[in-house]
Image (spheres, grey):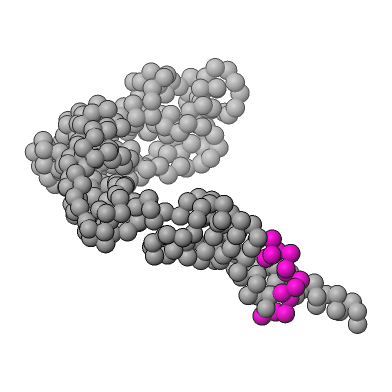
Amino acid sequence: MASMNEKDYYAILGVSESATTDEIRHAFQQKARALHPDVNKEPDAEERFKEVSEAYAVLSDEDKRRRYDAMRSGTPFAGGYGGPTSYGGGYSGQTGDPFAGSPFDWGFPFGTTSRRTSSRSRAYRPKVGADVVYDVTIDESTASHGGRRGVTYQHYATCDHCHGMGSVGTAQPETCPTCGGTGHITVDLTSIFGIGVMDMTCPECEGSGRVVANPCEVCGGSGRVLSASEVVVEIPPESHDGDLVRVRGMGNAGTNGYEAGDFVCRVSVPSEHVNPLQARGFSTLGFALPFILLGIISGSLYVSAPWWVVMLVFGVLMVLRGGTLSGHSAHWWQNALRTVLSGASSGLVFALFMTLMYSCNAALWGGFGR
């Protein structure tokens, strides 16, 4: 059996030593389809299939690939290479979120409104599209009376070439011929790194067990392409900072024909914001409240005074330095109260711990006194 240093996995897969992980996976998919024992009846097809699987198992893993490259260059890390590969099932038939731009501003973080995919994937992985969340800033008048905002944004849209199915000619997925529908392949690497049998996600179907029959050359088999759309958002009257306005079905298209997500407009009203310095002050005030409450309940208020007095002083100073407290709307005060309650929830855990420690120490010293 050839030693590990004698086997050229790059040559076995037909890729260069600088090949990317996607190129290695694509090469394995092509080799595996051609050499699978249920398809190829040549006497050496099974052994060649095992060899290709072993090559992929090593080169697809960054750590194993690095160690393999080191061994090829003469660095002694491990012993020989070899061992059987098992694969499941039989052969059946042939086989990120984009960001939003400014209102009517064409901001394309991926460089183009649509693109052809250089490499295609046969994996059939239907999934509901993610929502697209967009922040829109409005003034007090618009928040009070409502208004309309036009937004041009980038998202994944249904591929027109394959009608969103990812496959050209048929909408029905097929059982993956590489893993037989199990979604994984196993490779015995005992004699390489001493790690035994390794269970790997099948690179052909990416773990789903099913593949599209003829991947679309436009969307690469996913059923969707990057595109730009325009939506008009109706902001209702009496809106407030943090409110969400949802436009159904205008988010990212789902993969392989599944439904799209929503376009979610998150309202921002600057006049209702609690500025960062005041927010820290309110949070500090909230953090002090559990110490005061538990001090009263446990009778240790004066013992914990160094904690809560300092926090109250710093909290008040930060709130006052952050700006005037007069003239704010009721919603501003609601946000301030939420910040206080958030600080209180964090302080409660710490206050309980400190009270418990005080009680334990008191009991311990009391025991020594007896």
Please state which of residues 67 and 246 is positioned toward the viewer in this rendering: 246
Q: Is residue 270 left or right of residue 301?
A: left
> Please, is residue 319 above or below residue 207 in the view?
below
Q: Please tell me which residue is depicted at 37% across the width and 43% down the height of the picture.
A: 201
Q: Position of residue 231 (x, y in %)?
A: 17, 45
Residue bounds of the magenta highlight: 297-310
**Residue 174 visible, this orientation:** no
For residue 39, which quarter of the picture? top left
Q: Please tell me which residue is depicted at 30% across the width and 32% down the height of the picture.
A: 109
Residue at the extreme left? 169
Please state which of residues 94 and 206 is positioned toward the viewer in this rendering: 206
Q: Can you say which quadrant of the picture contains the C terminus?
A: bottom right
> Please, is residue 339 above or below residue 218 in the view?
below
Q: Is residue 190 left or right of residue 256?
A: right
Residue at the extreme bottom? 370
Q: Please tell me which residue is depicted at 33% across the width and 26% down the height of the picture.
A: 23
